[in-house]
Image (spheres, rainbow, N blue to C red):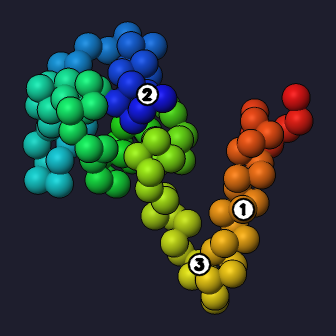
Amino acid sequence: MTFGKAIAQARKSKQLSQKQLASMILKDDGNPISPQYLNDIERNRRNPPGENLIDQFARILDIPEEYFYFLAREIPPKYFQVAPNNPEQVQEAFEAFARTYRRGKGGKKE
């Protein structure tokens, strides 16, 4: 799954057109993104956007922001609130995530 494909699927499941969704997603200057920009994102012609837009997509499409950040290959900013004391803590956190992720379905064994 790509970031763009996930946006497209979530948009369609909410029965929103690209024009409708684009009008709800605001850039930093307060203006909405263009339908063409959204189309480019959905077709993976653009890199995933920054955190402002990712957060809006997550909220409007009712998808956990962590999922969109994961697909964008980013770490949600809220996880930077607690700075690790050493590189081993970061490594341990990523390894714990990987173990849970490999098990699937929220870490529950199937």
* Residue drawn where x is 72% and y is 62% of the image: 95
Residue at horizontal 53%, vertical 41%? Answer: 67
Q: Which residue is mark 1?
A: 95
Secondary structure state at the residue bearing disc 2? helix
Judging depth in this view, the residue of 86 and 62 nearest the camera is: 86
Q: Position of residue 30 (x, y in %)?
A: 14, 48
How far is disc 3 from disc 1 in space, using C-alphas? 18 Å
Tell me the number on the disc at residue 64: none
Q: Amino acid at mark 1?
A: Glu
Q: Nearer the viewer, residue 51 or 103?
A: 103
Residue at label 3? Answer: 82
Residue 36 screen position, x and y as percent: 11, 26
Q: Quadrant of the C terminus?
A: top right
- Residue 6 bears which disc, if any? 2
Q: Earlier in the sequence, mark 1 or mark 2?
A: 2
Tell me the amino acid under the disc marked 2.
Ala
The image quarter containing residue 2 is top left
The front one of 57 and 36 is 36
